[in-house]
Image (cartoon, grey):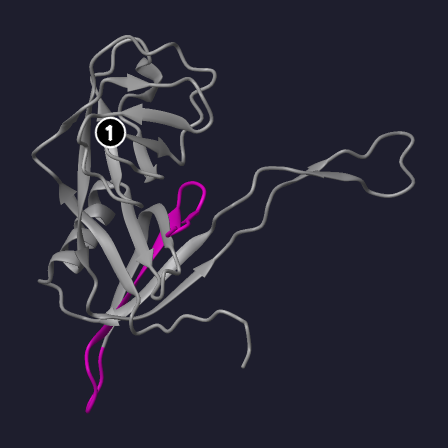
Amino acid sequence: MSAGKRYKFQGSTLQVSTGVDAVTKPITGITQADPAVFTAVGHGLTLGAVARVAAVVGMTEINDQLVVVDNPIADTFEAANINSAGYTAYTSGGTLAPLTYSAFCELTGANQQDGTADEIDATSICSTAKEFEQGLGDSGTITLDYNFAPHTLVQAAMRAAKVSGEEVVVRLTLPKDGGTIVMIGRVQQTSFQGSNGALWTGSATLRLTGEIFVLDAA
């Protein structure tokens, strides 16, 4: 038998952020580190949760940012997407407002495509051919295909986010302890189509706005 790992589409869970929890979590500490470590007593946040930070005193650079939860334990967690090493020291206060999710049960397919990293021209007088340095990477897009049901919570939330420009979080959990993948982006395009003898179907493309976070279930 092969020792390779594989994961079925069925049995996976894909969730989309559809709102913000009205109950916030108080912050009591944030380290200046990469990644930043948050202290929030009894926070209850799970791997791959995403929350928006507000009202921090001292480390004000972190306010209004979304944080991706990694390695959560009872009172602390790492923010996988935050390097706070160069931020002002935390003084006091702050809250975390966790995003709320809905399972995308109408989903029929998903396709994530990276963009191309920038090439910075480094050709000089001594070059014998074109020379380049690699610039910033591009996480590209994710396209979600689904059975079109416009009044479901996920599809309504994506239409609203397209109008408002608000960031949307997509959280994919693989079966058999395959881990959790978190992507943050803005809805770039939506469409729907139908024909005789078939279901109405739709798709949405999200332009990812930062790194894709692959978090270990262990």
Q: Is residue 98 above or below residue 141?
A: above
Q: Secondary structure at mark 1?
A: loop
Give left or right: position of 97 versus 130.
left
Q: Is residue 217 above or below residue 75?
A: below
User: Residue, x 20% and y 14% (percent of image)?
Assistant: 93
Q: Which residues are magenta?
A: 194-218
* Nearest to the observer: residue 38 or residue 24: 38
User: Residue, x 8% and y 62% (percent of image)?
Assistant: 151
- Identify the amino acid type marked 1: Asp
Residue 211 is inside the magenta segment? yes
* Few, some or many residues within 10 Å of mark 1 (<14, 14–19, 20+): some
Q: Which residue is mark 1?
A: 75
Q: Is residue 134 above or below residue 104?
A: above
User: Residue, x 19% and y 68% (percent of image)?
Assistant: 105
Give left or right: position of 156 versus 119.
left
* Nearest to the observer: residue 5 or residue 157: 5
Give left or right: position of 99 versus 207.
left
Q: Quadrant of the N terminus?
A: bottom right
Find residue 146 and report its horizontal and vertical position in percent: 25, 70
Q: Is residue 39 above or below residue 194?
A: above
Find residue 150 and report its horizontal and vertical position in percent: 13, 64
Using the rendered view, name the quadrant where residue 177 is placed: bottom left
* Nearest to the observer: residue 143 or residue 92: 92
Find residue 94 and report its horizontal and vertical position in percent: 21, 18
User: Residue, x 24% and y 29% (percent of image)?
Assistant: 75
